[in-house]
Amino acid sequence: MNKEPRVPHPRFRRMRRFVREQVVPFAIMAAILGSFRSAIADWNIVPSGSMNPTIVEGDRIFVNKLAYGLRVPFTTWYVGHWAEPARGEVVVFRSPADGERLVKRVVAVAGETIELLDNQLFINGQPASYRIPTFTPRGAPILATEQTSGGIHPLLITPGVPSRRNFGPVTVPPDHCFVLGDNRDNSADSRYIGFVPYDYITGRSSKVLLSLDPDTYAPRWGRTFSTLP
């Protein structure tokens, strides 16, 4: 005796259609977008002022994740590796101290010796080039410029704030770099968290995609699409 084929319950059919037409396409799109952000390009919201005045609170910076190589999405494994971080570049990385995502500037790479003497940066015994205003009110933050390689970037120095103005000399080990914040006296950088392994670096940043005032969320159009020095 042949049994009649079982007809799925209408509720089950509706659920199966919902999964096929709504859930599966969404999951595919999420996987593609997630893979793109993991391996190709991403953006990073900057909540702190450790890179002032180059990057300010509320900036959304572009992160080029192909700058140093191509990784398998959601891993640290390289499929192709074609460059190392260079002195003067702004990089996004995981802190070797606690895994927090940070943004800093590379000031020394593997094999180089770095030293700070009263906030004067020395690389391999050679002082970085500075330009400091001739007059600043006593105790006020000093906006200067620093040159560690071919590029010149702004630097914020705040007299009177407790900071490691003297550090080293130390030599950067292989496959690591030394990073500092442009807000030199208010930055948890390699003076505190140690050398940054190259594998911890997720990408390089060179642009502000969007900037919103952190208090009012009003767009700051003058910073949007601006290039980082």
Image (cartoon, grey):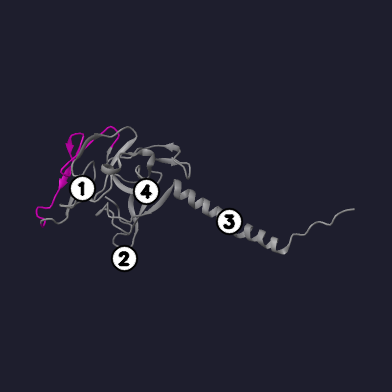
For the residue labelled by badge 3, is the local secondary structure a helix, a strand or a loop? helix
41 or 20, which lies in front? Answer: 20
Which span is picked out in magenta? 109-137
49 or 97, which lies in front? Answer: 97
Residue 174 seen: yes
Mark linked to residue 195: none
Instruction: Kindly identify which residue carries mark 3.
Output: 25
Mark linked to residue 215: 2
Locate residue 133, reporting x and y percent.
12, 53
For the residue labelled by badge 4, is the local secondary structure a helix, a strand or a loop? loop
Q: How far apart are marks 2 and 1 (CA)?
A: 27 Å
Q: Which residue is drawn at 27% across and 55% down?
A: 49
- The picture quadrant where one finds residue 169 is top left
Is 176 situated left or right of 160 in this image? Answer: right
125 is within the stretch colored magenta: yes
140 is within the stretch colored magenta: no
Q: Distance between the residues labelled 4 and 3?
A: 32 Å
